[in-house]
């Protein structure tokens, strides 16, 4: 198997898409490599990077001082002075002796020629051409061979047979084995061209020390020479795959130290290795990422099925912020685990593959809970599906409901952190729904019949049900004022966002626009601007599939987000040596990027980060209740409704799926209901123009006109067959017309009256049809004609507002219908408009047709 794996990796490494820099035993990485750069970002600085800031140690110290003085990173990089190199990035040969390493970096001379040049300077003054003339007279000296340390590929610096770095290390180690050179060996032996003897007390100990040595760490190099062939190929492939999506930065010193640690532990392969054996955290993260890349190469999808996990990338899917690896070993029954694997594979192959990993997590939770119950309660631990019956599912359902009622935790272990979640109503519903879907899928595919699973067992799994509908309340007025107070907002920024990542900007955008927190957090860099003179915010409403939607925002919010955009661009320039983002990079930049594992600036801050700071701020304000950020959305929806917006407008503005969903965001008190009740009014049959539209959502009135109209129609009316607006009657007086509402010009119809008046129209039509003669029928039609015109005008008004179907479905015999959407929906007050008089000819034609074809009327 290992040979096969090595052959696979060798073929991939030799492929055309593999980075050629990563091939070979010693990887020599260019200083400006796109994934593994190692040079200082100060222009023309010859020194390597040091730990942080992507600068050498000197420039990093200077930058810390400049940053404390308020200088930006881009300004510092433009003004910093480059520094010369102080160490050799790779071993250099003497310019005279090609078989000896250079000892002096400035002169590029070996140790012996360096001493000769210094002696020459004592006897002769150094001119500009003296050094060049001296070089031409110097003979080349033979070398000492390669370093005797097994992992080292450099030349020996002395007759001891060790390179300079290993010779210094040998001296620091106390000279194991006692290997040493004769005193003054240079004058006694080398100057006379005699071989230098090396005395060694214990050659075995000396050789053991040489074998245990690690390669010399050279800047820009990764030495993999003496690693096991499979391990070397795995490290090379892991570095290449990491370069495809470099979420985390891997310093070359980390890679070399990981290779050294593997060499020290004699690791043959990373596959199956526990990352916790490494002491450093970054080594563990690197090994985990490499193992994830290797699993996709070593195992086919069928192999993962047998091994008890599934790789989503085998199906071309990678969920956001999730690993491709999904562990299924929490399901102990092999038949159930195979059913789960097949179900998830079908989901990943589906053209409607979900955007997030939630469906996969839910079905995995359902299978884990069913598995844990069967392991504990079913015969033989539930490993034989043929013995399972419907009673086992019934007991499983009862057990889970009891756990929900008592507040206990799940039996199954499905969380990655090892903890067990508490059973709640929603989690119990998810277990039932996804468990049923899992078993029904096995029944449809024929897998249940193949393993002998009883159909009764599958049918017994219940539906989770719709659950208890819940909706959060809007903020109380005092809480809303506190959460929008300038002093409190500044406290939010100063105390809970000390690095100015945009916590206050997030919250102000949420309360002003009513967007979901995730929609604000995921904003792109170029999400705001003026279009046609109007400030707009562009965002993705992914929950409803509405991408790149725009909403109008006030100018102060536009200015705040513009300032945040400039900060984000400045930080990008600081991170990339002062250069601005390219057009392609700018299109994907996040407006609120995180600083963790985000070299390209595409990843936004997490909701957890926002929620943590926001929750701590609320606790500090001590508002006397439990509040969450999402209540700002409810608050805005309620205020939009109070100011005359329809549910359709609110749904479109907030990005809701339907009006029913928008209703969850609208909360009305009894006082609110009085103000918005019955905002669709038409003139009654006794007026000069029956059916005339009294309100509309097309031409807004002034604030004063709207208030006057609202008082006139809602507070100065009393219920009759419709609503009477005659003030003595409203005040409690007797009706001067003996309740003859049809012929009274102070009588109006509302949207809630439509069904009642349509029934009245049908009654009059039946009376006319049953009249003893045509003259009586014509009289009845003419008598009811003003009322019919009012009803037609009301229908036209409701149809134009999209409320006709709702009004026809309303039955006021049930008290709860007084709180129906037709009643609780507010519309903008408008100028009086003619709704029915323009269609008088149509009404006449309709009445004539009704008189001549009574069967059609009945139909």
Image (tube, grey):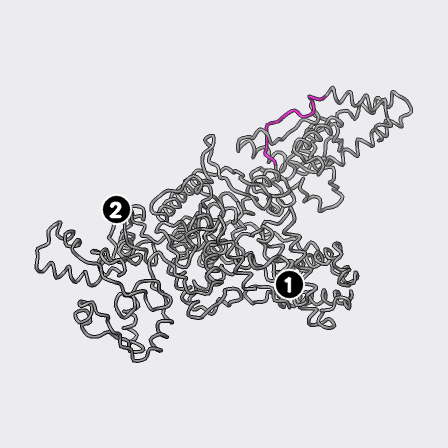
Residue 660, given in percent of the width and then of the height, sits at 65, 44
- Report the mark closest to the observer, 2 or 1: 1
Label 1: element kind: helix
Our reading of the magenta stretch's main secondary structure is: loop
- Magenta extent: 827-839
Residue 662, given in percent of the width and then of the height, sits at 61, 44
Report the side of 144 relative to 437 (left or right).
left
Residue at the spot of label 1: 306
Q: Is residue 694 above or below residue 61?
A: above
Work out whether residue 127 or residue 317 is closer to the camera in this orientation and state it: 127
Residue 69, given in percent of the width and then of the height, sits at 27, 51
Residue at the spot of label 2: 79
Identify the image quadrant of the N terminus: bottom right
Seen at 57% across and 28% down, the residue is 699
Q: Is residue 328 above or below residue 247?
A: below
Q: Name the residue furthest right.
A: 772
């Amino acid at each position: 198997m290992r040979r096969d794996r090595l052959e696979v990796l060798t073929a991939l490494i030799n492929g055309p898409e593999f980075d050629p820099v990563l091939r070979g035993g010693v990887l020599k990485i260019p200083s400006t490599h796109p994934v593994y750069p190692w040079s200082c970002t100060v222009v023309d600085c010859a020194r390597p990077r040091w730990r942080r800031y992507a600068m050498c140690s000197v420039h990093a110290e200077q930058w810390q001082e400049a940053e404390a003085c308020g200088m930006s990173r881009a300004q510092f990089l433009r003004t910093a002075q480059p520094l010369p190199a102080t160490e050799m990035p790779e071993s250099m040969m003497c310019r005279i002796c090609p078989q000896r390493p250079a000892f002096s970096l400035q002169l590029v001379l070996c140790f012996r020629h360096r001493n000769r040049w210094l002696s020459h300077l004592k006897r002769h003054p150094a001119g500009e051409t003296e050094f060049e003339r001296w070089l031409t007279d110097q003979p080349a000296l033979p070398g000492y061979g390669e370093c005797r340390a097994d992992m080292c590929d450099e030349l020996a610096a002395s007759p001891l047979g060790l390179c300079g770095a290993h010779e210094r290390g040998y001296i620091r180690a106390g000279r194991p084995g006692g290997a040493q050179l004769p005193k003054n060996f240079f004058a006694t032996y080398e100057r006379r061209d005699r071989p230098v003897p090396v005395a060694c007390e214990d050659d075995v100990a000396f050789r053991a020390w040489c074998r245990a040595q690690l390669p010399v760490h050279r800047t820009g190099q990764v030495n993999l020479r003496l690693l096991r062939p499979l391990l070397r190929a795995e490290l090379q492939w892991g570095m290449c795959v990491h370069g495809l999506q470099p979420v985390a930065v891997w310093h070359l010193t980390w890679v070399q130290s990981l290779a050294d640690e593997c060499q020290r532990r004699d690791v043959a392969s990373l596959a199956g290795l526990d990352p916790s054996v490494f002491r450093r955290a970054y080594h563990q993260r690197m090994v985990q990422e490499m193992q994830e890349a290797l699993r996709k190469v070593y195992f086919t999808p069928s192999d993962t099925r047998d091994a008890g996990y599934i790789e989503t990338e085998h199906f071309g899917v990678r969920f956001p912020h999730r690993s491709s690896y999904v562990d299924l070993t929490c399901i102990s029954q092999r038949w159930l685990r195979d059913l789960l694997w097949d179900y998830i594979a079908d989901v990943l192959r589906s053209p409607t593959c979900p955007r997030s990993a939630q469906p996969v997590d839910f079905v995995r939770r359902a299978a884990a809970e069913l598995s844990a119950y069967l392991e504990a309660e079913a015969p033989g631990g539930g490993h034989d599906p043929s013995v399972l019956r419907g009673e086992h599912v019934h007991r499983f359902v009862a057990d889970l409901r009891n756990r929900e009622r008592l507040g206990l935790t799940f039996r199954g272990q499905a969380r990655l952190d090892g903890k067990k979640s508490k059973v709640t109503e929603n989690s119990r519903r998810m277990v039932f729904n996804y468990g049923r879907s899992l078993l029904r899928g096995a029944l449809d595919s024929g897998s249940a019949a193949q393993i002998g699973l009883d159909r009764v067992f599958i049918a017994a799994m219940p539906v989770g049900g719709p659950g208890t509908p819940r909706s959060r309340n809007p903020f109380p007025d005092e809480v809303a004022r506190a959460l929008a107070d300038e002093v409190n907002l500044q406290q939010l920024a100063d105390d809970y966002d000390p690095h100015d990542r945009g916590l206050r900007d997030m919250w102000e955008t949420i309360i002003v626009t009513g967007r979901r927190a995730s929609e604000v957090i995921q904003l792109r860099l170029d999400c705001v601007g003026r279009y046609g003179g109007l400030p707009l915010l562009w965002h993705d409403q992914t929950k409803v599939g509405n991408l790149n939607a725009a909403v109008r925002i006030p100018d102060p919010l536009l200015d705040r987000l513009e300032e945040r955009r400039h900060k984000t661009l400045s930080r990008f320039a600081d991170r990339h040596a002062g250069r601005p983002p390219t057009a392609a990079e700018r299109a994907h930049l996040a407006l609120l990027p995180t600083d963790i594992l985000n070299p390209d600036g595409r990843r936004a801050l997490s909701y957890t980060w926002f929620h943590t700071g926001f929750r701590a701020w609320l606790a500090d304000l001590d508002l006397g209740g439990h509040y969450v950020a999402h209540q700002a959305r409810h608050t805005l929806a309620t205020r939009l409704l109070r100011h005359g917006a329809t549910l359709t407008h609110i749904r479109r503005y907030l990005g809701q799926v339907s009006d029913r969903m928008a209703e969850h965001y609208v909360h009305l008190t009894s006082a609110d209901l009085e103000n918005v009740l019955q905002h669709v009014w038409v003139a009654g049959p006794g007026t000069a123009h029956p059916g005339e539209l009294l309100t509309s959502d097309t031409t807004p009135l002034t604030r004063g006109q709207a208030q006057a109209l609202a008082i006139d129609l809602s507070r100065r009316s009393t219920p009759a067959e419709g609503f009477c607006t005659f003030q003595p009657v409203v005040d409690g007086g007797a009706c001067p017309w003996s309740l003859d509402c049809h012929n009274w010009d102070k009588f109006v119809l509302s949207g809630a009256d439509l069904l009642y008046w349509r029934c009245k129209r049908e009654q009059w039509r039946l009376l006319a049809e049953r009249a003893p003669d045509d003259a009586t029928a014509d009289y009845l039609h003419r008598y009811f004609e003003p009322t019919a015109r009012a009803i037609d005008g009301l229908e036209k008004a409701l149809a134009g507002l999209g409320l006709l179907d709702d009004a026809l479905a309303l039955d006021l015999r049930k008290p709860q219908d007084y709180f129906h959407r037709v009643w609780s929906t507010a519309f903008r007050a408008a100028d009086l408009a003619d709704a029915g008089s323009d269609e008088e000819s149509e009404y006449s034609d309709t009445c004539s047709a009704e008189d001549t074809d009574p069967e059609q009327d009945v139909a």
